[in-house]
Amino acid sequence: MIVLLQRVSEARVSIAGTVVAEIGRGLLVLLGVVRGDSETEAARLAQRLLSYRVFPDPAGRMNLSVREIGGSVLLVPQFTLAADTSSGLRPSFSSAAPPGVGAMMFERFVEQIRVSGVPYGVGKFGADMQVALTNDGPVTFWLEMEPPQPA
C-alpha cells in the first residue's frame, strides 16, 4: 500500500464540477493499493499516517502529527501510484490491485481514519476527480507498507 501525503493549508476534490470533499489545514492523502495488500497493511499505514510528524512545533521543527494540530485528512484513491515506470514510455499497472480489491482496501483505509476520530473527507474510487490543494511548505512524503512476501 502506498501513500503520497502532502501537508496542506486547504484541499478539495471535485467530480463533474461539484465539490465532494474539502478540508482546511491537514493532509491530502493519495492512496494506491498494490497486489497482495490486506487489511493489515491498511491498518498499519493509517496509524503511521495519523502519527507522522510533518507539522511544525513552536520552534518550527516538524514535530507534530495531524492529530496533534487538530487537522483533517482528505483521502483520494489513486491507482497510478502503483505504476511501474522503470522502462519504456508508458507506465505498467501490473502491480496495482484489481479494481474490486483496490476499492475494498481503500474503504478499509477510510474506515481506519474514521474510527480514529480525525476529521476527514473522501474522494470517490474510480471517478474522474479534480484535486485542488495549497501545499504548505511544500511538504510531500511517500509512505509505503509492503505486503507480506510469499514464503
Image (cartoon, rainbow, N blue to C red):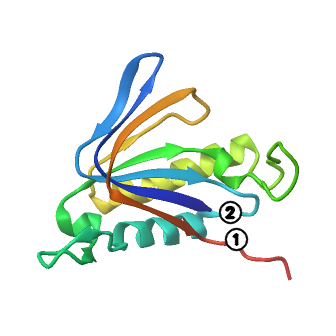
Helix, strand or loop at mark 1: loop
Residue, x 53% and y 68% (percent of image)? Answer: 143
Nearer the observer, 110 or 11: 11
Counting from the top left corner in percent of width and height, residue 46 is at 45, 65
Give the residue furthest to the top.
17
The numbered disc on residue 114 is none
As drawn, is 56 to the left or to the right of 45? Answer: left
- Quadrant containing the N terminus is bottom right
**Mark 2 / mark 1, whichever is N-terminal:** 2
Hey, what amino acid is under mark 2? Answer: Asp
The crowding category of the residue bearing disc 1, from other C-alpha atoms within 10 Å (few below 14, some 14 to 19, many at least 20), is some
As drawn, is 120 to the left or to the right of 127? Answer: left
Q: How many marks?
A: 2
Give the residue furthest to the bottom.
151
Counting from the top left corner in percent of width and height, residue 96 is at 75, 52
Image quadrant assignment for residue 151:
bottom right
Callout 2–callout 1 Cβ contact below 8 Å:
yes
Q: Is residue 7 above or below residue 41?
A: above
Image quadrant assignment for residue 103:
top right
Q: Is residue 5 above or below residue 91?
A: below
Image quadrant assignment for residue 84:
bottom right
Nearer the observer, 33 or 105: 33
Provide the residue designation for mark 2.
Answer: 37
Counting from the top left corner in percent of width and height, residue 39 is at 59, 63
Provide the residue designation for mark 1.
Answer: 147
Residue, x 36% and y 67% (percent of image)? Answer: 50
3D distance between C-alphas at marks 2 and 1: 5 Å
Q: Is residue 88 above or below residue 140?
A: above
Residue, x 79% and y 48% (percent of image)? Answer: 93
Residue, x 68% and y 63% (percent of image)? Answer: 37
Give the residue furthest to the left.
58
Q: Is residue 58 above or below residue 112?
A: below
